[in-house]
Image (tube, rainbow, N blue to C red):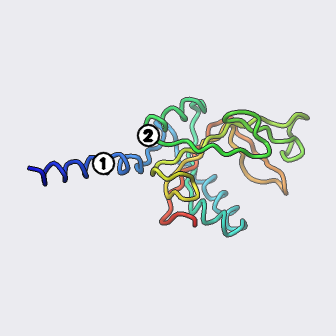
Amino acid sequence: MKTTALILACGLALMPAAFAAQFQPYPGATLNDELTKEVHAELAKARPRAQLLYGEPKIYTTTASFEEVLAFYKKLGAKEFMLATPYSTGPYEETIPAEMIEGAPPGGIKFKKAILILDGSPEPYKSTCWVEISYPLAGKMVGKKIGDIEEVTGITYVNKNEPLD
């Protein structure tokens, strides 16, 4: 009886980790093959560390709001990872200066962004399964500037074989 209870307890302890690692596309989101190929091409030119961090990501898009997509992944048990950047202007918010974006208004453009870890790791660098949610979605680079900004919510799904050391 004690052995059965111990096996059951161990199994239950592992269930949340197994569940958390399961990626589900946001309902109604579609895999965007063109953007996925563009990201793979940009990563091929990036620093090796960036290549290891992102592996071979898949990009999904949806017309759902940033907040709806964020709530969906939180319900799945994803853990938020907050990353401040030089452009952070609030929780989930970055204001990218106009000089970095093709055709941007003088004040730049506000982006919403969240990183959610699906496998229980403490940060995306140590994770093998995470998502980045962005609104609006920045597309192809135009020279050294961000271009092709789309008014959709992007979900970058990263699933790689091993974490970055």
Q: Nearer the viewer, residue 34 or 102?
A: 102
Mark on residue 91?
none
Mark on residue 77?
2
Which amino acid type is marked by label 1? Ala
Say whether residue 130 is left or right of residue 35.
left
Residue pointed to by mark 1: 13
Kindly state the secondary structure of the residue where label 1 is placed: helix
Q: Residues within 10 Å of mark 2 (few under 14, many from 20)?
A: some
Q: Quadrant of residue 88?
A: top right
Say whether residue 23 is left or right of residue 155.
left
User: Earlier along the polypeptide chain: callout 2 or callout 1?
Assistant: 1
In the rendered image of this protein, does residue 143 appear above or below residue 116?
Answer: below
Q: Quadrant of residue 80?
A: top right
Residue at 79 percent across and 42 percent down: it is: 87
Q: Disc 2 or disc 1, which is closer to the eye?
A: 1
Residue 107 place in picture, x, y as percent: 88, 33
Residue at 63 percent across and 52 percent down: it is: 35
